[in-house]
Image (cartoon, rainbow, N blue to C red):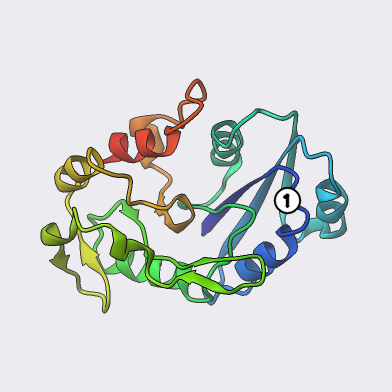
Amino acid sequence: MISVIIPSWNAAAFLPTTIDSVMSQIWASVEIIVVNDGSTDSTGRYLEELGDKISVINMDNSGGPSRPRNVGIEHSGGEFISFFDSDDLMEPDKLSKAMEVFTAHPEVDFVFTNFRSIDLDNKVLNRNYLSEYKVFRHNLEPSAVDDTYLLTGEETFRNLLRANFIGTSSVVCRRSIFDEVGLFDEEMKNADDIDMWMRIA
């Protein structure tokens, strides 16, 4: 099972389409955990309407995404974790493609993907986000799965020193990795994501 963790703060305008995109995944074994981070809009009411289709955790506002992500990890039941922001959309085969990699490469603990950026009207602003980042490309090795590549932890760490090319909503990883590296640093107001990726790498 994959646990999709969605921190949400005042995201009622986006959350329905975000959750629909996760519910539409080809991969069947998915647990959706929305951590309502003290929202003051209609987020709570919308989540109540979904009933037992998803798991909801309500908490006081934490001031950032680290605490909600950690709470989601602590309450997750899946062997794999997918982080997803509450204003993003997931391609229908996103999780199944990640699982193809984990199945073909048991040594892999962490998968991240390319993504597109869109505006409020779903107009594509950037079709190939990772094309802006050249630093890690010469270190990529072919994978057993089409259109995917391997990057060692050492090379990932070295390249993350130059730029954070890993989009949080693109990540799927083994839950067991957090037993080794710990959870997100809740003291950090910024860069808690790259701090986590570097610790994993």
Q: Is residue 125 left or right of residue 85?
A: left
Q: Where does the image place residue 127, in percent across and percent down from the top left? A: 42, 73
Which residue is pictured at 64% across the width and 53% down the height?
86
Which residue is pictured at 21% across the width and 58% down the height?
134
Mark 1 residue type: Ala
Given residues 68 and 102, the one toward you in this image is 68
Residue tagged 1: 11
Which residue is pictured at 33% across the width and 32% down the height?
180
Q: Where does the image place residue 114, in percent across and percent down from the top left? A: 37, 65
- The vertical placement of 25 against 160, above or below, is below
Secondary structure under the numbered disc 1 in the rendered image? loop
Q: Is residue 125 left or right of residue 156?
A: right
Q: Where does the image place residue 195, in percent across and percent down from the top left? A: 36, 33
User: Where on the picture, by quarter, is residue 24?
Assistant: bottom right
Q: Is residue 184 left or right of residue 155?
A: right
Q: Where does the image place residue 79, in percent across and percent down from the top left? A: 46, 52
- The vertical placement of 128 against 84, above or below, is below
User: Where on the picture, by quarter, is residue 129?
Assistant: bottom left
- The vertical placement of 148 against 162, above or below, is below
